[in-house]
Image (tube, rainbow, N blue to C red):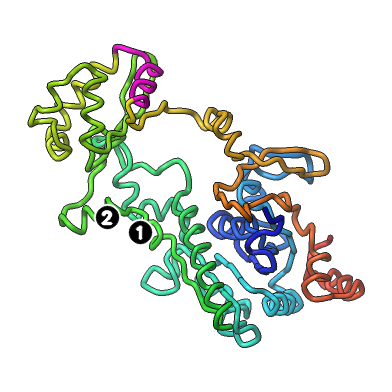
Amino acid sequence: MSKQGSLSGIRVLDFSRVLAGPLCTMMLGDLGADVVKIESPQGDDTRAWGPPWAGNASDKMSAYFLSVNRNKRSLVLDLKTTHGVKLARQLAAEADVLVENFKAGQMARFGLEYERLRVENPRLVYASITGFGQSGPYRDRPGYDYVIQAMSGLMSITGEPDGSPMKIGVALSDVIAGLNACIAILAALRHAESTGQGQYIDIALLDTQLAALVNVASNTLVSGADSQRYGNQHPNIVPYQTFAASDGEFVVAVGNDRQFSALCEIIEQPAWRDDPSFATNPARVANRKLLVAALQAIFSKKPQQYWVEALLSAGIPAGPIQTVQQALTSQHAYDRDLRWKANIAGDLVIDLLGSPLRLSEVPPMLRYPPPGLGEHSSLVLREWLNTSDSEIEDYRRTGAIGTR
């Protein structure tokens, strides 16, 4: 197993903040890329998005910032200064990848747009992540995840059928946009490696979330009818939902007729296997209310653990509804290395959520904990640009770089 990541030697200049961009660049860093996080003198917005906090006083970091900023080094550049922009251009000339998630057109106002930077660095892969993309009538709108969940239709299909539209509990549009940006960057790096030619990548949260509706969007396209809310049920599969046992709720996910036949044995209703109202999935969808009510009456008579164990023993997907704490402290999470120890603020040891990627030869690993603001300003300039100590002091005096 190599100690070098698969992206070792790749230099990433990260101008992104908050979630989608930082998640993308963290994944690149987990895979071995040298990621330099460019921050304003005020720092990434999420540094202040607490509580909860890790650490104390000036060394404290928000849990939000910690979640997507490991394996990066922080360089403070003031892009409102001439020298700050000059340094940014010099760094871009040495980078393989640049990621930014300002509003459309902001990088051009800094003088850091792709068309300008590609002249000095033709191999540069330049990824922009915005709410609505670089074209279209919405391009100039700010695009936070909550707005995207609303406009994409995601909220309209989330929640109880007779309730209000509901956002989901994590900024999923941001998360998937970050994943899509990472995939596109890896493809563009492969192209640059073989041709020497970089390219511009335009990732939009709205595009991402519409694509992430997958079968729900396909249902609408094929049927011409708008998708509905089903709460904890599934629009195309029955039974595929939560049920209340005598002591708590659990999930049953019957994905085919064989599994339904096995379910019938467990609940001692063998006649249902051949009942034309239930024998096939289309029939079960048509008779959803009747079947669900009958199943609920049965499941309510015994405890959750009994049903989950019985279903799993028959090969039927099932599981208890756990809290986040329960999921993170499960033996499975520990065995799968989903918690990484990191040192921040000196000797403070904290847990970070580990990478879900599993590569046998070059697995993701923790090389740098989430950085303090401007923690690596001098070091990065020395390594990337061979900047002298006296030049670094000059940049500090002009306010172009941070204090460290």
Q: How many marks?
A: 2
Q: Is residue 167 magenta?
A: no
| Rendering coords of residue 129 (x, y %) | 51, 65
Instruction: Indicate which disc residue 300 carries.
Output: none
| Rendering coords of residue 176 (x, y %) | 46, 55
Q: Residue at x 83, y 66 (%)?
A: 378
| Rendering coords of residue 212 (x, y %) | 37, 55
**363 lies above or below 383:** above
Q: CA distance from mark 2 to mark 1?
A: 8 Å
Instruction: Indicate which disc residue 217 carries.
Output: 2
The residue pinned by badge 1 equals 211
Q: Are marks 2 and 1 in contact (CB under 8 Å)?
A: yes
Bounds of the magenta span?
301-313
Of residue 90 and residue 342, the one placed in the foreground of this image is 342
Which quadrant of the structure image shows residue 307? top left
**Three-letter amino acid code at the position of disc 2:** Ala
Is most of the magenta stretch helix, strand or loop? helix
Which quadrant of the structure image shows residue 259? top left
